Structures are given as structure tokens and as C-alpha cells.
Image (tube, grey):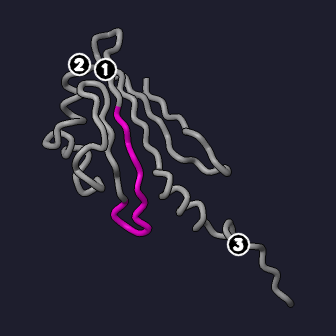
Amino acid sequence: MNEVKTLAQTKQQQTGFEQRYELDAPPEKVWRAISIAEFREKWLPKEALADPRSLSETPGKEVRYRLRDDSPPFLESTVTFTIAPNASGGTSLRIIHELTGATFERLASSVANSNSPTLMLAA
């Protein structure tokens, strides 16, 4: 079963989302796919990463990367991959993708009509 959830909302804006997947592959194979650059680049190219190295890593369990958009306004976000064995011998994969604090604040303040007083025009 695959599911997508919206994460915390601030001022009616989403800060990210969470996805969950049940995979048939064993955790060791999934771990290699998300943590070893040679395998990861087949589905997540290094150009999408702000830094090809992980921000943090708990071997065999969790890895976190920083992403950056390739077009303006070049938003940055973090994506965290967490794996665990499931009851059927496969892997439960949880992906959390969130805008970073500074990026989220910058985006929120740049939204049209949200960062300035209402203007009234004379007819």
C-alpha cells in the first residue's frame, strides 16, 4: 500500500509531505538504492541535490539529503528516507520531503498579496 500525507501546515501552507511504500525487496537492497551514489543517481540525479553527500545517516535505517530546484527561485528542501523490515520479508519505505525553514519563510513572504497591506486605488 502506498500513501501520501501532508505534513504540518503553517498559515494554511504546506511545509512538506510524507509518502509510505511497502516494497518486495529486502531492506539491504533498498538501503543500497538510497544510500550509494552510483545506485541513487539512477532515480535521483546528483544535479537535484544541493550537496551529493548526505546531511545525516543512520546506516541501514535512515538517510537525509538536501535538494535544490534547478530553476528560480531555487528552493531548497530536505528529503529523508527511512527503511524498516516489514512482516512479509520486504521493506517499509517512508519518504518525508520538507521545505527548509529559511526557504519556507522566504516562499511564504513572496506569495502575492501576503506580505503587504491592502492597496486601494482611486477611480
Q: Is residue 60 left or right of residue 111?
A: left
Identify the residue shown where x is 53% and y is 63%. Answer: 106
Which comes sooner in the sequence, label 2 or label 1? 2
Q: Residues within 10 Å of mark 3 (few under 14, many from 20)?
A: few
- The residue under label 2 is 26
- The residue under label 3 is 116
How far across and down, in percent of the image, does residue 105 sit? Answer: 55, 58
Q: Which amino acid does label 3 sit on?
A: Ser
- The residue under label 1 is 91
Does the CB distance between marks 2 and 1 fall below 8 Å? yes
Q: Is residue 108 left or right of residue 25?
A: right
Identify the residue shown where x is 47% and y is 50%. Answer: 99
Image quadrant of residue 115? bottom right
Which comes sooner in the sequence, label 3 or label 2? 2
Q: Which amino acid does label 2 sit on?
A: Pro
Image quadrant of residue 91? top left
Question: Spatial distance from mark 2 to mark 1, Cα to Cα?
Answer: 6 Å
How far across and down, in percent of the image, does residue 44 sit? Answer: 26, 46
Q: How crowded is mark 1: few (under 14 residues within 10 Å), some or many (20 or more)?
A: many
